[in-house]
Amino acid sequence: MSHSKDKITFDEVIEQVKTYITSEQEIKNIEKAYQLAFTKHDGQYRKSGEPYIIHPLNVAKILTTVYADSTTIQAGLLHDVLEDCDCTNEEMESIVGSEVTKLVEGVTKLSKLHFSTENEYLIEYYKKIIVGMSEDVRVIIIKLADRLHNMRTLWALPEEKRVKKANESLEILAPIAHHLGIHKVKSELEDLALRYLKPEVFYDIAERLNKTKLERDWTVHQMMEEVKDLLTEHNITFEMKGRSKSIYSIYNKLDKGKKFGEIYDLLAMRILVHTKQECYLALGLIHSKYRPMPKRFKDYIAMPKPNMYQSLHTTVFGIDGYLFEIQIRTYEMDELAENGVAAHWAYKEKENTKANLQSSTEQKLQFFKSIIDLSNDKMSSEDFVNSIKEEVLNNNIYCFTPKGDVFELPKGATPLDFAYKIHTQVGETTVGALVNNTIAPLDYELHNNDIVKIITNKSSKPSKEWINMVKSTAVKNKIRSYFSRNEKDIYIERGKESLEKELRKRKFSITEFFNQENTEKLIKEFKVENINELYLNVGNGKHSPKTVINIIHKLEEDQQPKKMPHQIEQDLDTDIIVSGIDKVKVNIANCCNPVYGDDIIGYITKGNGISIHRVVCHNLSTLDDRIVEVKWNKKSNTKKYLTIILVYCKDNENYMADIIQKTSMIGISVDYIKNVTGSNHSIYQANCYVSSKEKLDKLFLELNKQNYIDKVERIMR
């Protein structure tokens, strides 16, 4: 197998660089970087048998094809030096400067990661790629060039590694190249990956393309001649080229059930002109001569894709009835379509283009940055991977504001996703939405090209139900963090309101009740740091408003014709005492399963007595002020209470009998136990009956001593 095209020289790279970089200083800087790479890699060889320096040279050559700037090319030449050679960051910085060194450090970070189908590794891989990208997008461009050359020499690796690298390229790197608009790299990565993952399919398509090549080439040539005459006749200066379809894109269409003969864009051509106006003029002329195929016209010039792609697409019935896919774009659009954000640096001198690219690049980086938030949230491995796959690496939809700004959203997104995408504050104050000038519910599923107007109200706040309405994981997390951030404030407000309501009900002056002397007494009595902490404890149900008021106004409590708590405690037939009420029906809540000794609170249900919850039960946050103070009857502790525990083991051996034995020894009976996972680690769910929290704590202590147990926890539903 010949791979001579890989054996390039530095002179060839510089020749290519000079086609778009004219500064002598920048050329010298690239030469300096090459000298350092050459010296450091001296004596090293690749698995393919060639000197190692051939790899960085090829990476630099790939970078020149996407018009990377001189700094990126220097980093491309040096990208393996910190990791594989005897060279410190300081030494590199002293020779090529800090910007290049930073880029090399970024690539080195990525290279240390090994992709695996195991979710944990996958997460780390995505995370680091995205974090790397958020620091400087050029790190990813170098990584893509590095991977592309490695894919070209993949034959040198053992079969297992080939499949791994090919999978990684197809699943992660090609979609990121697409997301950055670097079509050239994306296409080749996909084709090379397919060649190693499904060689028989790859070579079958390649063979079929070769068989029909002569006929196709002749037909395209004839069509091009006709179109050339048409454009020349109308004085349009243009360049035209036939366009080959990538093998992977053909495979994709065949995979979706299309027949080889039906893939009409195998016959494709591209027309390059100088101005935007000429694009539309050329399109009009072509449509006047060749009948366009309905629903196949796309105007990406007026509405560019978020990865900066601009072009007119049309499919027409050409010569001999063949269907032709024609793309019409300006030269600049063509460069950007092929090279995406990488070309951002090639157009430095063109200020307008630079500003547009800068803003588009920043938007893209913002998009990737939002994914970093996912990694910081406590999500399961699977959720993280799925959210990345769904939201970053999959097909998205593009919706517009009434002003024409475009936003990229995951499929299935709603107006709420759109609102938060504009700005978190817009999301949090959303009260309604117009989609294509029609009122739409907030859970309406948006479609491509919808125009969305968000209606806001400054005094409006998010609702917890929104979490189920939005598609984007980043937005779900924003809504969750709003509630966790505001929960404390909400409880304080709720506690203050319920205290004042109770004071008004009992005809006490609010100002007098909270005078300095009373406030100090309450703070001391309830062992809190300030009055807000007391409001918080009333708001979350730890203390009832009556209890707080009774600390200051004991007399009123004494005048109540009811049994005192100590009298009630004499009734041995009740386990739970409800403050101020003699006999009442109580139920143990099955969401948090309190056991004797837990800190508890009562909630007055409608028609079913009082439901007893643990103070830490998350369901209390949704309850209103129908909360009463309750406590365990110290004279009555004869019952056993149900509690559900999870035991996490370090491996998947069977420890069921051992767990039951340990539980029985402490006097806790296991009613039911099962293994709830079939992975590398066993997790046992046990429904136990326990007489007190003290016994339960003893069990936890005993189980945590066992070497095979990772942790034990109580379930709260």
Image (cartoon, rainbow, N blue to C red):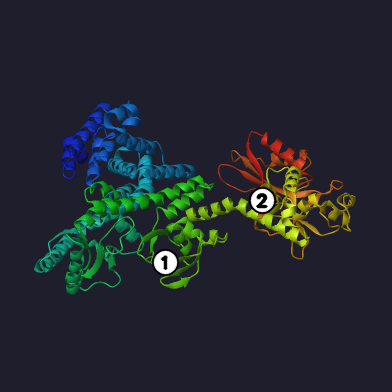
Which is more toward the observer, 657 or 698?
698
Q: Could you tell me residue 696's position as x and y percent? A: 74, 42
Tag shown at residue 452: 1
Few, some or many residues within 10 Å of mark 1 (<14, 14–19, 20+): many
Tag shown at residue 716: 2
Which circle's residue, 2 or 1, is located before the other in the chain?
A: 1
- Decide if residue 446 is in sight here: no
- Decide if residue 469 is in sight here: yes
Q: Give the left or right position of residue 422, taking residue 145 as reference.
A: right
Tag shown at residue 41: none
Few, some or many residues within 10 Å of mark 2 (<14, 14–19, 20+): some
The amino acid beneath tag 2 is Met
User: How far, Cα to Cα, is label 2 from label 1?
Assistant: 40 Å
Q: Nearer the viewer, mark 2 or mark 1?
A: 1
Q: Residue at x 21, y 67 (%)?
A: 280
SS at badge 1: strand
Q: Is the residue 252 above or below the residue 42 in the image?
A: below
Q: Is the residue 298 above or below the residue 55 in the image?
A: below
Q: Could you tell me residue 632's position as x and y percent? A: 81, 49
The amino acid beneath tag 1 is Val
Q: Residue at x 77, y 63 (%)?
A: 608
Q: Give the left or right position of residue 152, taking residue 402 as reference.
A: left
Residue 28 image-quadrant placement: top left
Q: Are marks 2 and 1 in contact (CB under 8 Å)?
A: no
Q: Give the left or right position of residue 332, taking residue 603 as reference.
A: left
Q: Could you tell me residue 330's position as x and y percent? A: 20, 59
Q: Is the residue 22 above or below the residue 83 in the image?
A: below
Q: Could you tell me residue 182's position as x and y percent? A: 29, 51
SS at badge 2: loop
Residue 279 image-quadrant placement: bottom left
Q: Residue at x 72, y 54 (%)?
A: 511
